[in-house]
Amino acid sequence: MFVDRRNWLRKRWRFSDPLFWQLIAAYSSQNRYYHTVEHLYHVLSMLEQLGGESIALNLAAWFHDAVYDTHAQDNEENSAELAAALFPEFEQIHQVRNLILCTKTHQAFDAESQILLDADLAILSTEPEHYQSYAAAIRKEYFWVTDEDYRIGRSRVLESFLHRDRIYHTPTMQAREAIARRNLDAELQRLAHL
């Protein structure tokens, strides 16, 4: 399946081969269990479903988790800087940077950011079994955090989504909002019993 995903991604990459392989290597690095090539594939395929066709939006999706270190607090900033460093002449690089940065707070600022955030958070509205696999993969990425600290931190993240008036922005994803909320609630219940 990895080769199929990689081939699908390769067909959608509009830039140089070395940059493609650099990104694939980044998403394939050690200690990534959710923020992987598979996640990149799902985000980009959701962009297609949600009508996200601009080069800037797609470039932001490619780079949004290019730098990912669970010990760091500035992954999105570093991912945005990487994109800017590799594409300094791209006329919309400021938009690319802003799109990547909005994945930190999950606060949309325009229609493109709404599409990117909905694509990035689509995992929340998957079938319960798939969602549980996602939650387990996130936990593995934070293997170094104690169960108690993880429970507290992860619960805060989940509650921050649940306290929003809406998680999703696009009509397609708004139709899946109730599923996402059920999954988040179920994970909170599981965390309460850690």
Image (cartoon, grey):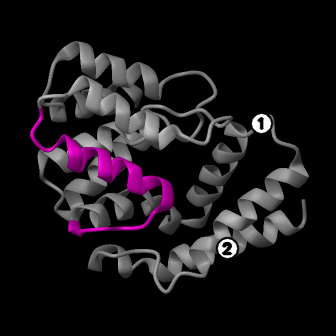
Determine which of the numbered discs, if any, sits on residue 143 in the image: 1
Q: Which residue is mark 2?
A: 159
- Quarter of the figure with the N terminus: top left
Circle 1 or circle 2, nearest the eye:
2
**Residue 130 left/right relative to 50:** right
**Residue 169 left/right relative to 144:** left
Residue at 53% in and 73% down: 180
> Residue 12, relative to residue 97: is it above or below?
above
Residue 107 lies within the magenta run: yes
Name the spot of residue 121 as percent of width and height, x first: 45, 61
Disc 2 is placed on an element classified as helix
Instruction: Tell me how many marks there are.
Output: 2
Q: Which residues are magenta?
A: 90-111
Pick whichever of labels 1 and 2 is earlier in the sequence: 1
Residue at 68% in and 35% down: 71
Residue 82 lies within the magenta run: no
Q: Residue furthest top?
A: 18
Residue 162 falls in which quadrant of the image?
A: bottom right
Residue at 49% in and 60% down: 105
Residue at 67% in and 38% down: 141
Name the spot of residue 14 as percent of width and height, x first: 12, 30
